[in-house]
Image (cartoon, rainbow, N blue to C red):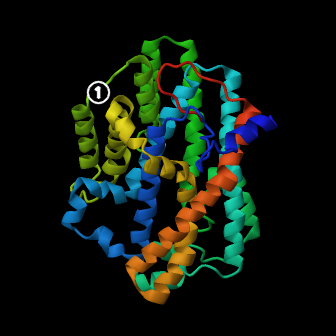
Amino acid sequence: MRAAWLSAVVTSGSTTLINIESNRDAHLDGLRGLAAVSVAVFHFFRSFDNDFLFLNAPLHKNLLSALWNGHFAVTVFFVLSGLIFMRKFYQGELLDCLRGGLKRYLRLVFPIFILSMATFGLHALGGFYNFEAASRSGSDWLIKWYRYEPDFWLAIKEPLWSAFFSFDAAHTYNANLWTISYELLAVFSVIALGFLCRFIPKLWQFVLIASFMAIGFQTRYFDFFVGAALAFCLIHFRVSLPIWAGAILVAFSLLVVRFNQPSLTHIQIIYLEYPLAAMTLIAAAETCRPLRVLLSQRVLAFFGRISFGIYLTHMLTLCSVASAVFLWTGSLWITFLAYAAVTIPLSVLFWRALDAPWMAFLNAVFRVKKVKPVASLQSA
C-alpha cells in the first residue's frame, strides 16, 4: 500500500507530479480548471467591482463573458461529476458502489477539514478584512462573511457534517461549501442510479435516468442527472465529431451562458439553460478530438490539477489578503494581482501537500480498479 501511495506522488523526471488518478481525462481536467478560475474571477468582481457584473455592458454580451460567469462554472462542475460517477459505476457491483460512496465522503472531508482549521486560525488572529473592504467597495456579498466570533467547534463540525447536511451560509468557514452537499448527496444518487442499471435492460435504464432527471428538475440535483444521462449516451453510442461541429457546439453553449441575459428568468437560467449548455460543452469536449487536445494543453492541465484548491482557497484570500490590499491601495487591478499572486501558489501548495497525497492514499486503500473501456473514463 505504501509503495502504491508513494508512486502516485513522486515526480517522474520532471517538476510535474504524476497524475494521481491515472485514468483521469486531461481534457475534462482542463474544463474543470477553467471552471475554477471562472468562479474565482466572478467572486473577485462580486467583491470589489460589483457594478461591473450588473451593468448592461456590451462586454457581457460576447461569448467570452462565460469566463466570468461563476454560476455557469458551478453547473459545469456538477454536470462533470454526474458524468464521471455514472461512467465509473454504471452497472457496478454493490460492494464497489458502497466503497465508492465512502471514498467520495473521505475524499471531500479531509482537505476541507484541514483548510477549515487554517481558516479558523486566520479568523482568530484577526486576519479577515472583508467587512471593511466591502464597506468601501459597496459589495453586498463580501460583507456577509466571517461576521461572527471565531468558532472552533464550527471549524470541526462543518467539514465533517454540517457542510453536507445542514449548511448555514451565514455561519460558515467557507461560503463555497454550499456546493459540497450536492457533490456528496447527488453523487450518492448517481452511484445508486448506476447500480440500478445493472438489473434492467437498456430501454428501462433510459427511462430510469429520465425519471431521476424529472424528479430532480428545478434543483441542482438535475445537473448531476444531466451528466449521468450524457454518460449513458457516451457509453452506448460512439461519436466522433469533426472540428467544425465541435466548434458549433462550443459556440452554442457559450452563447446560451453569456453573462448578461435579461430576457430569461433566474429559474430558467440556473435550472434549465445552464445544465443543458454544460452538457453540450462537455459533449463537444468528449467527442471532438481537436477540442480534447486543446483542453489538454499544459496550462489548462495545471489549472485542472489545482482546481479544487482554487475553489476552496480563493474565499480565504479574498477576505484576507485581497481585502487588505484593496483597503491599502484602493486599486482594483493591484488588488487582483495580489489576489492571483496568493491564490495560485496557495492552491498549488494545497494540491501538492494535501490533495494529491490524500487522493493517492485513498486510491491505495480502496484499490481503484480499472473499469471496462467503454469510453474515456475518469476516476472518482
Mark 1 secondary-structure assignment? loop
As drawn, which residue projects farthest toward the top? 201
Question: Residue 161: in sight, yes or no?
Answer: no
Residue at point 63%, 50% (across, down): 164
Question: Residue 353: in sight, yes or no?
Answer: yes
Residue at point 49%, 72% (across, down): 339
Q: Is residue 261 above or below residue 18?
A: below
Residue at point 69%, 44% (across, down): 10
Image location of residue 116, percent across then percent down:
68, 63
Residue 23: quadrant of the picture: top right
Residue 127 as seen in the image, left or right of residue 135:
right
Residue 244: quadrant of the picture: top left
Residue 4 as seen in the image, left or right of residue 237:
right
Image location of residue 305, percent across then percent down:
54, 48
Image location of residue 151, percent across then percent down:
72, 71
Residue nearest the observer in this picture, 138 or 350: 350
Q: Which residue is mark 1?
A: 241
Residue at point 53%, 63% (across, down): 344
Image location of residue 33, percent across then percent down:
46, 50
Q: Residues within 10 Å of mark 1 (few under 14, many from 20)?
A: some
Q: Which residue type carries mark 1?
A: Leu
As drawn, which residue projects farthest toward the front? 13
Q: Is residue 80 above or below residue 50?
A: above
Q: Is residue 310 above or below residue 83?
A: below
Looking at the image, how many numbered discs can be counted on the residues?
A: 1
Quadrant of the drawing holding the N terminus:
top right
Residue nearest the observer in this picture, 218 or 363: 363
Residue nearest the observer in this picture, 279 or 339: 339
Quadrant of the drawing holding the C terminus:
top right
